[in-house]
Image: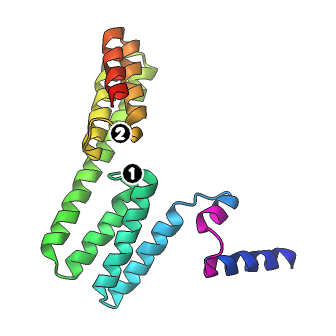
Amino acid sequence: MVLGQLLQEVLDKLLSGEADQVKVVEGLGLDPHPAPINRYIDLGKQEMKTRQFADAERQFRLALEYVEGMYGKGSAESGSAIFALASCFKDAGRTADALQQFKALYDLTLATQLSLAEQNLFELHSSLEQWQEAVTYAEAALNSMQQVFGMKVHPLLQPYFEMAARARLQAGDTAGAEAVKKVWLRG
């Protein structure tokens, strides 16, 4: 009974806006980030069913803003929001807008999935101490992510710079490792 009352109080606070949804979800030990994204996308899908495309677009843009705020512009996590927005434009007959969004989704998917493959190839070659191959894939992953972000240096690229520097160092290329670090530090 006490647990039921507590859950009802939390639910009431969430519905009234008194409680922060992210903090409540985190408090339950769950990943808070998909909740608002999924809510916006679900609301947008409902609007699309009734052909309320302007309202659907607003929901999908809110989802995209939220995910980009959490994970960064061009992150793999933004794919579902971009797809929903592109589909909305397509169904609304906004072909040019749909085309633009689907191209962005294509580029994002190619870059982020390619980067994931490159990271795994780096890790596997590293585990076999095949350092030249590890350098190749570490730098390819860094390059892929730089293309995703559209910039040479970004705070979210730090792990990729570290990976490339570590690979060069392990390959015996101290000067190359230092050059990678300098690019990162120069920002």
* Type of amino acid under label 1: Gly
Q: Is residue 8 left or right of residue 100?
A: right
**Amino acid type shown at disc 2:** His
User: Residue pushed farthest right?
Assistant: 1
Taking the view exactly as shown, the residue that stands out farthest to the left is: 96
Residue 16 painted magenta: yes
Q: Residue at x 43, y 80 (%)?
A: 43
State the extent of the magenta-drawn residues as a range. Answer: 14-25
Q: Position of residue 39 (x, y in %)?
A: 48, 74
Tell me the residue that label 2 is attached to: 154
Residue 170 in which image quadrant: top left
Residue 167 horizontal side relative to residue 54, left or right: right
Q: Hey, which quadrant is residue 169 in on the image?
A: top left
Query: Does the residue at mark 1 contact the one at mark 2 (Cβ under 8 Å)?
Result: yes
Disc assigned to residue 125: none
Disc 1 from disc 2: Cα separation: 10 Å
Percent x, y of residue 11: 68, 78
Residue appearing at x 66%, y 65% in the figure: 24
